[in-house]
Image (tube, rainbow, N blue to C red):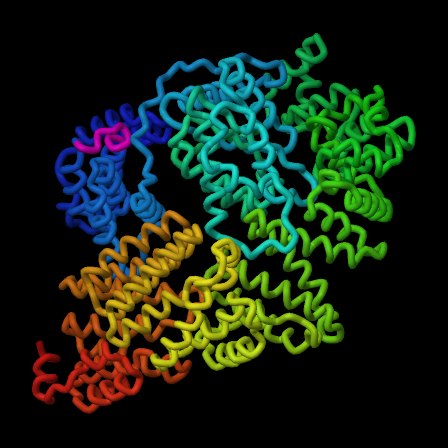
């Protein structure tokens, strides 16, 4: 059918990045349409009617999407509005309308289109918008929506054909197009995916050569293919390369990037989530600055072997690269079993300017060309067929077969024939050279020649420069060497007997540990090497370096990497904790560190945090009498408050108050702060005000540098925030907002972006408590913006709930269902405190909207929860709403009495002393 063929051409053109052609094909297809198939009412043809209707709608969506992609968003806005009005549940059309409105400078309208769609889906289907729509919503909030891409001109040169890239003309042409487009239309990121030896690095080198020939700077980052890469290893190399290029003196970048090059300080302060974002932004800013004059190519080789934090930083850069002139080329093996790698590759492919090249084995013609290039003779058809069959067209395997005139392979991951060929090349004529090669295999990365010399007791540089080894080795920088191909290292390591492996691991670690700068290794690498030698009596060394690696990763903002090390340390310590006070104290420190990091990476109040905290609580009585437990008590008390375990929190706070010395205001503030938080949630407002005032006064004397060091570990700015909630509830609105301003000012003084965000979040809770709907809309927007920009879903969740709540109070009754769903989502990760507060707000909103039955049911739910966990801060409000909903004056009066007992002047005035008939008439209205 001609319509289908034209529509398919349009879809292909849009996928290929040619929106102008796509719009032309789709318009021509729709021009063939006559009549409306939906008028047919015969049962026999209903399936065909549905299919044809769907085909027409899909073609119309394609036409509109192509027009928006081509930059004609203004011209098709009326068509988009009509389409979305007629088909409100189709998210593709709604996505294009939001995109067109945003590009037309109408951000508020674009957000309203999203809210309308979310409301429709919640009311009619009980679901949330899909991931594409949510991602666009986040981008609109954070102003990171890409500009309309200009069509890619055809006929771009594919670059010079390389001898080693036989059969890759199409891929070379695509990379040449991307290089040109990056410098002209905005940055690009592409991932070259394929098996070992398929030619990924050669392709990346080809585009790097082409860039260099055009005077475009190139920097490389490579990751070792064995063992655990050090934190941010890829980016450490890239930054080293960027540092010598024009534009690298980005203002303010040196401080934010210090963790990539400096050694971790002993006793480094706690994890700082804000610093991690600053470092990400600094890397992106540096890439943008260096790329601005003439472009830039960044090659990240072997992403599959990268550490988790390097991948996270790359995912962040992918969201900004389109605003630069950089081409980022990533190579990776297709490790589909690695969920983290799969997620990273998916994010890169979805990013603006993103794409992916999947390399397959060479065909027969290309293999014949390769053999001819390397041997000078045309191969027989039989030889080509055998090579294709045995190697799958893998260029490296073919090269090794031809070079060695024998079979080749890696015993585990590669065909046996390829292992044998590699092993033939690895044969060393003397034991000393063999020892150097074996240590390189154990290292799994380049090694400093001084370390290799010390570990072997030889002149490694001279041995590896000899003809027997020179073809295996490449220089990796000043004074360091590596295997020329990762497969050489893999085969070397696989061929070592297990006892010899352990000996070499221990020797490498022991030598490096005694050298300045650890011989170029990292604490994480020393931990890995000692871990492989535990059977030789190196268990204590493994534990010591694992803890050092966790501290090092935390200091470098590599929190996921730090958690991996802490988990290993905890597993080793746990069996001895019950009988050894030293082991118990060490594991307690580990679990507190885990608790701190999990609150940043998973979420405050999450189940993962509770599990770590529960283990820490069990360890408290097992630690020795001289153990300093104060920071542990503070951390556990904060977790208990988030979990609505107020009795546990009170016990920890009292123990902490008794243990705090007078000469440390930071620790001295911990006990009063926790008692103040508990007082707020349990409805003892005067006590809460007094305790929080003590804590705030103490913290005012702490140096800002120390406050910055506690971000993520102890809530040093929160006494002001919680006191704002207390004073608002007591009826002193002016004092409450003064406290919020003080928290914001202290965050600025300490240069703490995380504290600034928290001040905004607590301002939102104050708004909710005061039932200030107009301020609620503003607070919702600020929470969403901060959460989207800093990737903190909790902030976005609060913002979504507050936006729906404010809309209901503004008369939009249809938002009730969405408000309730957003309220429940806040607690999805395990947070338990504040639930009665949100329930009270929802119950009041239902009452305001004229649904007393649901209001009363929610109030009952809130009162039950308050009784169960002791969170009685809004018991009076819940009784007020329930009494009004049921016309029960006694319930309202009881709420007023509770508010008076608590000193909650705001709720006393809200309850009032109205006669029953007034209450009843208000309920009916």
Q: Residue at x 81, y 35 (%)?
A: 452
Camera-side residue: 900 or 867?
A: 900
Residue 535 image position (x, y, % from top left): 83, 56
Asked whether the viewer can see residue 775, the reply is yes
* Quadrant that contains the N terminus: top left
Q: Residue at x 54, y 42 (%)?
A: 311
Q: In the rendered view, would you say 880 is above or below 390? A: below
Residue 699 image position (x, y, % from top left): 46, 64
Residue 634 image position (x, y, % from top left): 53, 70
Q: In the rendered view, would you say 486 is above or below 599? A: above
**Along the horizontal axis of the image, is 891 left or right of 866?**
left
The residue most toward the bottom is 890
* Quadrant that contains the C terminus: bottom left
Give the image quarter of residue 82.
top left
**Along the horizontal axis of the image, is 540 left or right of 144?**
right
The residue most toward the right is 430
**Along the horizontal axis of the image, is 125 left or right of 616?**
left
Q: In the rendered view, would you say 73 is above or below 525? A: above
- Residue 69 drawn in magenta: yes
Q: In the rendered view, would you say 323 is above or below 40? A: above
Prevailing secondary structure of the magenta residues: helix
Residue 474 image position (x, y, % from top left): 73, 25
Question: Magenta residues?
Answer: 66-74
- Residue 357 drawn in magenta: no
**Along the horizontal axis of the image, is 382 left or right of 905?**
right
Q: Residue at x 81, y 31 (%)?
A: 423
Give the image quarter of residue 819.
bottom left
């Amino acid at each position: 059918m001609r319509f289908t063929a034209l529509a398919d051409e349009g879809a292909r053109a849009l996928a290929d990045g040619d929106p102008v052609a796509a719009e032309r094909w789709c318009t021509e297809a729709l021009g063939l349409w006559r009549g409306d198939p939906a008028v047919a009412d015969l049962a026999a043809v209903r399936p065909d009617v549905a299919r044809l209707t769907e085909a027409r709608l899909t073609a119309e969506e394609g036409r509109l999407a192509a027009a928006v992609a081509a930059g004609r968003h203004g011209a098709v806005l009326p068509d988009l509005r009509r389409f979305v009005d007629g088909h409100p549940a189709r998210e593709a059309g709604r996505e294009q309308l939001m995109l067109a409105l945003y590009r037309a400078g109408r951000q508020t309208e674009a957000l309203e289109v999203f809210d309308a769609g979310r409301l429709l889906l919640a009311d009619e289907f009980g679901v949330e918008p899909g991931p594409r729509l949510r991602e666009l919503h986040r981008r609109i909030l954070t102003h990171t929506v890409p500009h309309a891409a200009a069509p890619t001109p055809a006929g771009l040169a594919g670059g010079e054909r390389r001898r080693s890239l036989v059969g890759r003309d199409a891929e070379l042409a695509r990379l040449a197009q991307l290089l040109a487009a990056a410098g002209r239309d905005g940055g690009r990121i592409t991932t070259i995916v394929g098996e070992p030896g398929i030619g990924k690095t050669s392709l990346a080198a080809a585009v790097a050569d082409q860039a260099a020939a055009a005077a475009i700077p190139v920097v490389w980052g490579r990751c070792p293919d064995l063992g655990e890469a050090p934190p941010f290893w890829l980016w450490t190399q890239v930054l080293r390369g960027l540092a010598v290029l024009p534009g690298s003196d980005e203002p303010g970048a040196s401080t934010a990037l210090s963790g990539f090059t400096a050694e971790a300080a002993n006793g480094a302060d706690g994890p700082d989530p804000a610093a991690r974002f600053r470092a990400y932004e600094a890397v992106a800013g540096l890439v943008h600055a260096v790329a601005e004059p003439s472009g830039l190519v960044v090659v990240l080789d072997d992403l599959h072997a990268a550490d988790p934090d390097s991948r996270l930083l790359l995912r962040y850069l992918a969201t900004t690269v389109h605003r630069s002139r950089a081409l980022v080329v990533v190579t990776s093996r297709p490790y589909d079993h690695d969920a983290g790698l799969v997620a990273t590759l998916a994010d890169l492919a979805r990013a603006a300017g993103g794409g992916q090249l999947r390399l397959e084995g060479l065909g027969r013609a290309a293999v014949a060309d390769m053999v001819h290039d390397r041997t000078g003779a045309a191969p027989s058809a039989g030889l080509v067929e055998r090579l294709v069959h045995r190697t799958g067209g893998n260029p490296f395997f073919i090269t090794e077969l031809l070079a060695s005139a024998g079979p080749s392979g890696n015993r585990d991951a590669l065909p046996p024939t390829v292992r044998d060929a590699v092993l033939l090349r690895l044969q060393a004529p003397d034991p000393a050279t063999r020892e150097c090669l074996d240590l390189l295999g154990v290292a799994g990365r380049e090694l400093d020649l001084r370390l290799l010399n010390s570990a072997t007791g030889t002149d490694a540089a001279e041995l590896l420069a000899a003809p027997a080894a020179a073809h295996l080795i490449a220089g990796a920088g000043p004074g360091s060497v590596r295997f020329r191909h990762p497969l050489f290292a893999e085969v070397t390591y696989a061929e070592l007997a297990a006892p010899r492996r352990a000996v070499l691991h221990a020797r490498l670690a022991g030598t490096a540990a005694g050298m300045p700068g650890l011989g170029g290794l990292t604490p994480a690498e020393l931990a890995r090497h000692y871990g492989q030698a535990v059977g030789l009596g190196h268990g204590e060394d493994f534990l010591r370096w694992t803890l050092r690696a966790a501290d090092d990763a935390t200091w470098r903002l590599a929190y996921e990497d730090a958690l991996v090390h802490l988990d290993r340390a905890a597993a080793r310590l746990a069996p001895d904790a019950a009988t050894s006070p030293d082991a118990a104290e060490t594991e307690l420190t580990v679990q507190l560190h885990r608790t701190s990091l999990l609150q940043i990476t998973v979420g405050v109040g999450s189940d993962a945090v509770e599990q770590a905290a529960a283990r820490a609580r069990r360890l408290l009585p097992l630690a020795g009498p001289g153990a300093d437990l104060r920071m542990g008590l503070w951390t556990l008390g904060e977790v208990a408050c988030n979990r609505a375990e107020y009795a546990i929190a009170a016990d920890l706070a009292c123990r902490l108050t008794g243990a705090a010395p007078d000469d440390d205001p930071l620790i001295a503030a911990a006990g009063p702060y926790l008692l103040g938080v508990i007082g707020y949630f349990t409805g003892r407002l005067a006590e809460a005000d007094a305790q929080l005032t003590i804590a705030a006064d103490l913290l005012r004397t702490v140096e800002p540098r120390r406050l910055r060091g506690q971000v993520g570990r102890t809530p040093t700015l929160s006494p002001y925030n919680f006191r704002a909630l207390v004073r608002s509830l007591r009826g002193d609105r002016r004092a409450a907002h003064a406290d919020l301003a003080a928290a914001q000012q202290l965050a600025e003084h300490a240069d703490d972006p995380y504290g600034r965000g928290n001040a905004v979040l607590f301002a939102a809770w104050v708004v909710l408590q005061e039932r200030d709907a107009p301020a609620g809309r503003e607070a919702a927007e600020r929470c969403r913006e901060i959460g989207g920009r800093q990737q903190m879903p909790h902030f976005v969740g609060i913002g979504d709930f507050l936006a729906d709540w404010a809309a209901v109070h503004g008369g939009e009754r249809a938002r009730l269902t969405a408000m309730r769903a957003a309220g429940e989502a806040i607690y999805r990760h395990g947070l338990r405190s504040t639930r009665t507060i949100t329930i009270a707000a929802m119950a009041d909103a239902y009452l305001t909207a004229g649904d007393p039955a649901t209001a009363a049911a929610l109030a009952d739910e809130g009162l039950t929860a308050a009784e169960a966990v002791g969170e009685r801060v809004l018991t009076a409000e819940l009784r007020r709403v329930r009494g009004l909903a049921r016309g029960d004056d006694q319930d309202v009066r009881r709420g007023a009495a509770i508010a008076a007992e608590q000193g909650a002047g705001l709720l006393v005035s809200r309850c009032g002393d109205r006669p029953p008939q007034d209450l009843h008439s208000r309920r009916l209205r």
